[in-house]
Amino acid sequence: MEAMKGCHDNKGSRRLEEEQEEDCNKDLEAAKTRGVVANDVVTETELNKIRLVRAFVEKHDPSSKEEDDLMIRRFLRARDLDVEKASAMFLKYLKWRHSFVPNGSISPSQVPNEIADDKAFCQGRDKTGRPILFVFGRKHFQKKDGLDEFKRFAVYCLEKMCASMPPGEEKFVGIAELKGWGYANSDVRGYINALSILQDYYPERLGKLFILHAPYIFMKVWKIIYPFIDNKTKKKIIFVENNKLKSTLLEDIDESQLPEIYGGKLQLVPIQNS
């Protein structure tokens, strides 16, 4: 009888494992349909942790049901697949989103002064299909009582970049042009706030950031900002040597996708017109 019982237990265990494997395979297929699998394949570990984060977060904020699995995976990856940390980060994002972007998006009418500076442009894609954001540091100035508008502008730009990503792509490339940058542009508080928005609320969206023509005085400000940059973001930042500018950019971006000012063929398009 004990032998028969053990046999039944083993069959039951195998049946349960088979059912779990079948469920997992179904979830993987469903994930592909929902777009969870982008340029890299979702792993079984990631899929299981996506489920755990979603279950936890939905109990605390039912509105999270509207968010897709791709977003949850980005938060997980930002926290090295730690479910507890990713869940806390995701809940913080949802709370921020409800209060800072209550209408679901930032309109140009909410950032008129920032748009008037004509400092952000979006056009072209790198060799992997990631859209490119160009920012001209010399055109940014700290404005009196303007921090909130600049933070809204940071969100406006990030949302524009996300909207321009082709299906299956999750990241964008940034190019910061600092030629002509001076102390008048050293808005440390603004830079740190924009960095915080990128890292805390748009994790795993930045693919790479090229910094061009960085003057000596910028490096003094950079030393203040650097401690606020997380390790994952630090690895994506490249200071380009002046004499290797075009060759460095061409490693990631075809000449046809570069603006004319860098020897390419595209005209700069203001981000509000992209």
Image (cartoon, helix red, strand yellow):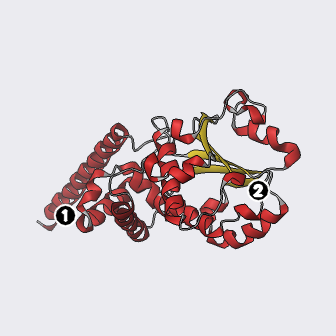
Q: Residue furthest left?
A: 1
Please determine whether, in this image, residue 147 is positioned above or below residue 15. below
Q: Residue furthest right?
A: 243
Q: Is residue 42 visible?
A: no
Residue 104, position as x, y percentages in the image: 35, 51
Q: Residue at x 59, y 39 (%)?
A: 270
Q: Residue at x 85, y 47 (%)?
A: 242
Identify the disc placed on residue 258. none
Q: Residue at x 79, y 52 (%)?
A: 180
Q: Residue at x 78, y 31 (%)?
A: 263
Q: Amino acid at mark 1?
A: Gly
Tell me the SS state at disc 1: helix
Instruction: Tell which tag, 2 or 1, sits nearer the viewer.
Output: 2
Tell me the SS state at disc 2: loop
Please determine whether, in this image, residue 66 is positioned above or below residue 274. below
Residue 8, position as x, y percentages in the image: 16, 58
* Residue highlighted by disc 1: 6
Q: Amino acid at mark 2?
A: Trp
* Residue highlighted by disc 2: 181
Q: Is residue 189 left or right of residue 203?
A: right
Judge by depth and name the residue closer to the eye, 28 or 8. 28
Task: Tell me the quarter of the image containing the N terminus.
Answer: bottom left
Residue 71, position as x, y percentages in the image: 41, 52
Q: Is residue 208 left or right of residue 249?
A: left
Which of the two labelled residues, at mark 2 and mark 1, occupies the earlier sequence position?
1
Q: Quadrant of residue 12?
A: bottom left
